[in-house]
Amino acid sequence: MKLMKTLAGVLLATAAMAMTASACELTLKSSDTHPDGYPTVEAVKHMGKLLKERTNDRICVEVFHSAQLGQEKDTIEQTKFGVIDLNRVSMGPFNNLVEETKVVSLPYVFKGVDHMHRVMDGPIGDDILKAFEPHGYVGLAFYDGGSRSFYNKVKPIKSIEDLKGMKVRVMQSDIFVDMMTALGANATPMPYGEVYSAIQTGVIDGAENNWPSFESSGHYEVAGYYTLDEHLIVPEVLVMSKASWDKLSAEDQAAVRQAAKDSVSVMREMWVAREKASEEKVRAAGVEVITEIDKAPFMAAMDSVYEKHVTSDKLKDLVARIRSTD
């Protein structure tokens, strides 16, 4: 029943899209769970603008934001079968499908945002994008997901001890679950769209995310404590259905790939501005922001996560290459 409702929504959205994009020979449907105006949404719109110009109005992109086509777990499946053409997705939900994505989802694997950019813009990033293809997706580009930190409605988190026993929402990823377990918290995998009400009603105590997501979701309204532990710097990925990709000519494939790459700098510029604005809004709302925190115990607790998830030679090599990148 849920799948039928989701597919019905896609068909209705497609019909509406056809009316607005009738001038294009091909209109690619793109999904995003974030709201309109969010940097990832605007970046894919920019990609569509570039693609439309470079193909003389033959190819357009229509972005369905705010989870109009479903939550990420549902849209990932729809993308594989070509129901959705393009999808901006968090890396976590891909962890159990594309092994290589586990590495960039590991806590503290990156030294900072600039380090993450250098890694993902280089050969390591290219290798990870290629790893999507055997699973029915074409990796196009990486966007920023910011630094993820903990927030909750119960108390300030200043140490690992403060996390013990807390019910914390995480993405539906084994790495995220194991990270919380290693920190002594009770991990609660849950779709992003359910988090606000779950915090509000006490089903969970809190969650973890970046400044823009914490603000745009309204979670700051129900979670009054935000701890800048920055345990994760996980890039997000823009993928295309391989079923849709294979229908394009080689020339159009190249145009799509280049337009996606060219949208990254636009996304990053918008991200920096959005991050600052979101932080200011959250602080102005009276949220207590905890900045004085010793990250060393948090990092040390992650040894068990690495031991469990970095098991193959391929993943061990990727971790070593990331850590050796200046």
Image (tube, grey):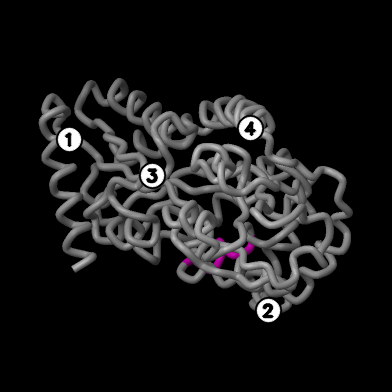
Q: Which residue shows up at 88% across the image and 59% down it?
A: 296
Camera-nearest label, 4 or 2: 4
Q: Quadrant of residue 202?
A: bottom right
Q: Using the image, determine if residue 220 lies above or below residue 160.
A: above
Regarding mark 4 in the picture, which secondary structure is present there? loop
Q: Position of residue 138 (x, y in %)?
A: 39, 53
Residue 322 seen in render: no
Which comes before the other along the chain, label 1 or label 4?
A: 1
Quick one: label 2, few (<14), some, or many (20+) residues within 10 Å?
few
Image quadrant where one finds the N terminus: bottom left
- Residue wearing tag 4: 285
Image quadrant where one finds the C terminus: top right
Q: Report the amino acid beneath label 1.
A: Met
Q: CA distance from mark 3 to mark 2?
A: 31 Å
The span shown in magenta is 98-103
Q: Report the amino acid beneath label 4.
A: Ala
Regarding mark 1 in the picture, which secondary structure is present there? helix
Q: Position of residue 75 (x, y in %)?
A: 33, 56
Quick one: label 1, few (<14), some, or many (20+) residues within 10 Å?
some
Q: CA distance from mark 1 to mark 4?
A: 37 Å
Q: Nearer the viewer, residue 175 or 237?
A: 175
Q: CA distance from mark 1 to mark 2?
A: 45 Å
Q: Report the amino acid beneath label 2.
A: Lys
- Residue wearing tag 1: 17
Quick one: label 3, few (<14), some, or many (20+) residues within 10 Å?
many
Q: Which residue shows up at 64% across the image and 72% down it?
A: 186
Residue 185 seen in render: yes
Q: CA distance from mark 4 to mark 3?
A: 27 Å
Q: Using the image, determine if residue 271 lies above or below residue 307.
A: above
Q: Which mark is residue 32?
A: 3
Q: Which mark is residue 308?
A: 2
Q: Nearer the viewer, residue 169 or 93?
A: 169
